[in-house]
Image (cartoon, helix red, strand yellow):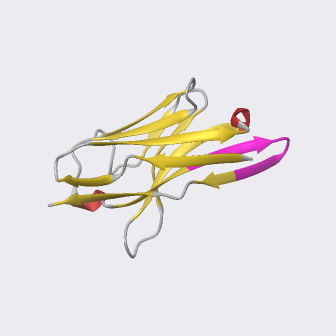
Amino acid sequence: QVQVVESGGGLVQSGGSLRLSCAASGNIRSIYLMGWYRQAPGKQRELVAEITSGGGSHYSDSVKDRFTISRDNAKNTVYLQMSGLKPEDTGVYYCNAATIVGATNENYWGQGTLVTVSS
């Protein structure tokens, strides 16, 4: 099993920056993909950015060129650097770890961290 814990959310003004962290523990070697998702009030959870174990990354169109996902393998931590924040970036941000053990895929979620962007 894998556990993920997010941190770094908060209140920021429009145009500001925040960095979110996601620390993973447990069966780290089973993780092949980690991602950040967000859920705004009244909306479905959506993918923000993801990064593979090899370092390849993918972003949603709405955050491309503003957000950067990175990983520190020594610390088993994935980061989401958010810049140029907009009120529509407000939501609960969740970290996800996708694992594979044998032929079994599992997804693990953190408890979420709230990001509020004021206009």
Q: Residue at x 54, y 48 (%)?
A: 5
- Picture quarter with the C terminus: bottom left
Count of all numbered marks drawn on residues in the image: 0
- Indicate the quadrant where residue 67 lies: top left
As drawn, 43 above or below 106: below
Q: Residue at x 48, y 64 (%)?
A: 45
Q: Residue at x 23, y 58 (%)?
A: 117
Q: Residue at x 53, y 34 (%)?
A: 77
Direction left: furthest residue? 119
Q: Is residue 14 shown left or right of residue 94?
A: left
First to last magenta residue range: 96-106
Q: Is residue 113 shown left or right of residue 105?
A: left
Determine if the magenta segment contains residue 2.
no
Direction bottom: furthest residue? 42
Q: Position of residue 75 (x, y in %)?
A: 55, 28
As drawn, 46 above or below 60: below
Most foreground residue, 32 or 3: 3
Task: Considering the whole magenta stretch, tell me its main secondary structure.
Answer: strand
Direction right: furthest residue? 102
